Image: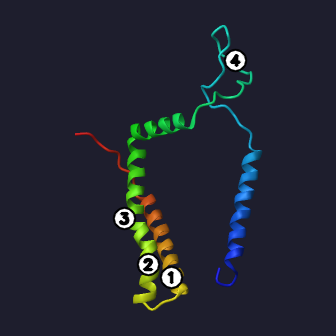
Amino acid sequence: MATLSPAHAVTGVAACHLLAFCILNLLRRESLPGTESVTAEGGTEGGADPGPPARTSVLHDLREGVSYTVKTPWLLWTLLWACISVLFLIGPIEVLLPFVVRDQLGGDARMFGFLLAIAGVGGAAASLATASFRCRAATSP
């Protein structure tokens, strides 16, 4: 990015988002399993198009999503851990690292980028190492 301009980066990101939007609009919608339409006789229409899905409100969808998250322990704890780590770990690092590089290490943008790259490589290596560990099933006493 130092050789180009931030405008080129913003344009590239915008073009990628536009491409993703176009591709998503080309996908066709399919009904989920178990959402067949019900006929007047009480049966389901197997091969017929079920028609448009019932419209729900945003608040209903949010309540349903929060309820599902609270009822699913692994999802709840994953989200809580992610929120806590962003608040107390990632946030301070992203805010304070440029000041540490400039004031204590005497570095510039190049050193800051290098440190971010090293952090990314370390994160990727740690992810690969963690993924290679054998998963142990939880046992109840």
The residue positioned 38% from the left and 48% from the top of the image is 77
Frontmost of labels 4 and 3 is: 3
Q: Is mark 4 on a helix, strand or loop?
A: loop
Q: Foreground: 67 or 113?
A: 67
Residue nearer the viewer, 2 or 47: 2
Circle 2: element type: helix
- Name the residue tied to disc 3: 88
Amino acid type, residue under disc 4 in the picture: Glu
Residue, x 68% and y 66% (percent of image)? Answer: 13
Identify the residue at horizontal 54%, vertical 85% (top origin): 109
Q: Quadrant of residue 57?
A: top right
The spot of residue 86 in percent (x, y) is 42, 62
**Classed neighbour count for the residue bearing mark 3: other residues with Cα under 10 Å, few (<14), some (14–19), many (≥20):** few
The disc at residue 45 is 4
What is the crowding at mark 1: few (fewer than 14 residues within 10 Å), some, or many (at least 20)?
some
Badge nearest the viewer, 1 or 3: 3
Q: What residue type is labelled 3?
A: Phe
Where is residue 113? Give x, y as percent.
Answer: 54, 80
Amino acid type of the residue that numbered disc 2 sits on in the rendered structure? Leu
- Residue bearing the label numbered 2: 97
What numbered label is drawn on residue 112?
Answer: 1
| Mark-to-mark CA distance, 4 and 3 | 53 Å
Q: Residue 35 carries which label?
A: none
Task: Say what amino acid the circle numbered 1 marks.
Answer: Phe
Give the mark nearer the N terminus: 2 vs 3. Answer: 3
